[in-house]
Amino acid sequence: MPGSATAVPARPVTVAVVGAGPRGTSFLERLLAHLEHGSPEPAGIELRIVVLDPDEPGPGHVWRTDQSPLLLMNTPSFFPTAAPTGDEGLVTSSVGGSFEEWRQTHPRDSAGLGRNDYPPRAMYGRYLAELYAKVTQALEACDVVGKVEWIRAEVTGLEEAQDGRWRLDWAGGELTADSVVLAVGHVPARPTREQDRLATVGGQLGLHYRAPNIPCDLDDDSVPAGADVLVRGMGLNFFDALAQFTLGRGGTFEHSGEGPGRALRYLPSGEEPVLHPCSRRGTPYFPKAELDSFVPHGVSLKYFVAPVVQELERAHGPLDFGVHLWPLIHRDVIRAYYHHLVRTRPEALGGVERAAEFFSGLVGLLEAAGRGEPVTARQAQELLHRYAPGMPFFDIRALGRPFAERVFTSGEEYQDAVQDLLEGICGEAAQGEDSPLMVAVGTLHAARLLVKRLVAEGRITDASRLRDVMGWFETLVEGLASGPPLLRVEQLLAVARAGLVRFAGPDPQVEVDQERGQFTVSSPQVGGGEEPQDVQRGSWLIEAMMPANRVQRSASALVAGMLSSGLATPYLAEDEEGGQIPGRGFAVTQRPYQLLSAEGQVRTGVYVLGLQLASVQWGTAIAAETGQDPDGRAMTLGDADAAARDVLRRAAAPR
């Protein structure tokens, strides 16, 4: 009709999300939130959103809903979320919510789980599956979204198309996208030389080697009853294996009527293997304290605080963790420990008045600036000995390697030492905030959260990150503060007392005895009888750890191909001599973390979320904490939010 306006067709824009676990789901939820709030307003476009993952979207692989209910999360129900709840300072979507909110509205699905209980991973997967379904349904209701499509495929290739877009390939298909969000999560890793040697030589002898793997992928049923199984690693994957080889084999635990550390008795089914766990520390991760918060309420950092850190930066520039930050953290840990010791056990320091006098003197000592850890510890120890001459000074670094200075004449002596240590730690964990030790560990953990932020903001030098943060602080915090729930350590002790767990000592040496046709493990600190060392043997060796999170060791065709083509490159950290050391993750820009090529060029429109940010973040596998700062304890939400905003900004930009 003359004079009528012709409608301009919407410009198609394709967004590809590679990986649909928690990180990919969070990105989609953030995309929805910004579309619902109209910021930025992407007028004149039609979004096609393509999600690519070989596993169910939402849970992805790690949180898949069909895995054993014995595999538990490492955080209580109140902690994790894949979407903001309104307290994080981020705009909320119409369908977002935390796991705790999901639990409260799904009493049947959550099977009586309490706020402070540790959920099965499969249950968290059901939360993620529902969140994904609601988000995609709400996205398709948005005016500018044409379709959200899930393709069950593993992307094997990514390259730049001629028009500045991105081409993705997988078996039997390909896609060209305007933006690509890489949220691939845990991927297989190539074995180290030692792992390859153990697998090859062991295989030639008919032995059974199991490489690092995601716990739900471990074939536990293939291990026969009564088999001696060497288990390298005593972190969270070890406790998963313990549950599968005991409860999963029909064994049961009953209450013993005794106190913490001896609270359970194990009744074997007869189908269990015998486990021989080992680790550098020689002990498993310590249990988490019984608390109703992630960080104890009584924890308050006094020295390692933002204004002090900023003043140090003004004076020194980028900070050295060991020189500038650890002395502050150490002082906070010491203050917290003795503050709660004075509150809960003043008799240990001569009574209420003398304990208060000691603590006043300790605070005065800690308030004085300029000391490193050794000087502070020495002076505080001298002060302590005036009030409690026989009491050893609290040394949190030594607690991370509790047997570092000890030798044991027999394996039996070592078993007793580990069990005594763990029984004592269980007693402390059961006391929660009434335990000076657990409050000190909680203080260390609170400091870790601030260190995590400083790492992400690039405020600690590369050399110090390599030497200190990755070199010893990371393992210290993980061993003391990132352990399993108390129940798991009680179960471990019960199984050990039943004779089905036998610990190897610190710094284990794992070998293949070709003459006897067995794997062996021994410790240089345990032995002295007829044989020079306490050697434990088995026909099975399980690496109780996740595949290495290093892009250069990735066995993913996608990640390896991106590196070999130069599309991506590892982050290069500078060591103390100016040498360049490849980091764990990709080289990326600042938020929104767009990929950098081998030539240092920004790969505009390719965003990295999650584990492959390991070179510019710390603790990338940790979920966002409900209600916390998106630049800190809910960093994964902040990362997803920044990527979503930039994807929409680019989509709305004229071409």
Image: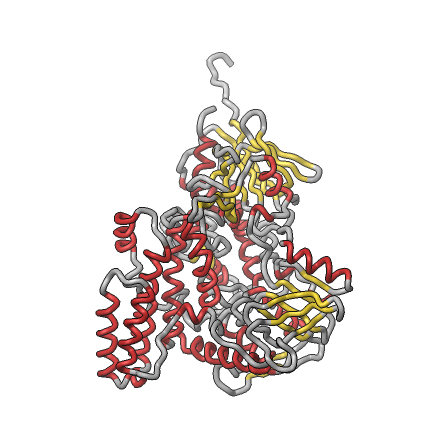
- Residue 232 lies left or right of residue 519; in this view the side is left
**Which residue corresponds to the image point at 26% horizontal and 85% vertical from the top-left?**
351
Indicate the position of residue 566 as horizontal and vertical percent values.
57, 35
Measured as percent of width and height from the top left, residue 375 is found at: 30, 67
Left or right? Give the position of 651 relative to 361.
right
The location of residue 528, given as percent across then percent down, is 59, 80
- Report if residue 35 is visible in the image: no
Res 230 → quadrant:
bottom right
> Does the image show residue 222?
yes
Residue 205, by quadrant, is: bottom right
Q: Total marks drawn? A: 0
Say which residue appears at 61% left-offset and 36% top-offset.
168
Residue closer to the observer: 108 or 27: 27
Q: Nearer the viewer, residue 84 or 557?
A: 557
User: Residue 245, relative to residue 655: is it above or below?
Assistant: below
Position above or below: 256 against 506? below
